[in-house]
């Protein structure tokens, strides 16, 4: 009968005060005194290992989606694209209040201008 030993546990980096949150190494005295939680020149990148695709900031896709839909609302189906732009701007506003407010204003203004352009164009064509 063969006795198997449990698999070795992976060495986990200590976490908490005094250790880098990215790489797990102990922080230097100066870094601890200044209250830093990561090394100033941490060898581990913030967004994954080298060669991996860099992570994007939360909401950046929604930001661009709102801008694009706002611009589309100027010429094509302002109520539809304007509503989508407003919805995306509100979602961005949850994570970045300043950017969300700007996008919301842009979406509303572009929607209203698009509706006026559409009404004027309709009157000229009929």
Image (tube, rainbow, N blue to C red):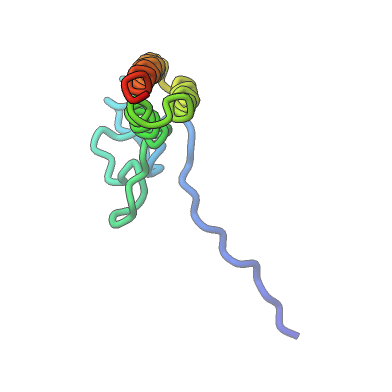
Residue lying farthest front?
126
Residue 77 in picture, x, y percent from top left? 43, 30
Residue 32 in picture, x, y percent from top left? 34, 25
Q: Dividing the image into 4 quarters, which one contains the N terminus? A: bottom right
Question: Count of labels shown?
Answer: 0
Query: Dividing the picture into quarters, in which one does residue 102 lie?
Result: top left
Residue lying farthest left?
41
Above or below residue 69? Residue 121 is above
Q: Nearer the viewer, residue 82 or 57?
A: 82
Residue at 38% of width from left, 27% of height from top?
73
Q: Dividing the image into 4 quarters, which one contains the C terminus? A: top left
Residue lying farthest bottom?
1
Q: Nearer the viewer, residue 11 or 116?
A: 116
Residue 5 in picture, x, y percent from top left? 65, 71
Query: Dividing the picture into quarters, in which one does residue 35 lie?
Result: top left
Residue at 30% of width from left, 32% of height from top?
28
Q: Is residue 106 visible?
A: no
Query: Dividing the picture into quarters, in which one does residue 99 lie?
Result: top left
Q: Nearer the viewer, residue 115 or 26?
A: 115
Residue at 39% of width from left, 29% of height from top?
66
Residue 89 in picture, x, y percent from top left? 44, 23
Above or below residue 89? Residue 53 is below
Q: Is residue 1 visible?
A: yes
Q: Nearer the viewer, residue 44 or 53?
A: 53
Residue at 25% of width from left, 33% of height from top?
40
Q: Seen in the image, is 65 located left or right of residue 4?
A: left
């Amino acid at each position: 009968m063969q006795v198997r030993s449990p698999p070795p546990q992976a060495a986990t980096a200590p976490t908490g005060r005094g250790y880098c949150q990215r790489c797990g190494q102990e922080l230097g005295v100066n870094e601890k005194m200044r209250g830093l939680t990561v090394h100033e020149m941490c060898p581990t990148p913030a967004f994954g290992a080298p060669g991996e695709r860099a992570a994007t900031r939360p909401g950046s896709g929604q930001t661009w989606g709102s801008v694009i839909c706002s611009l589309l609302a100027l010429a094509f189906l302002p109520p539809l694209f304007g509503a989508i732009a407003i919805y995306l701007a509100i979602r961005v506003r949850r994570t970045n209040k300043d950017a969300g407010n700007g996008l919301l204003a842009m979406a509303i203004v572009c929607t209203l201008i698009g509706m006026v352009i559409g009404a004027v164009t309709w009157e000229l064509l009929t």
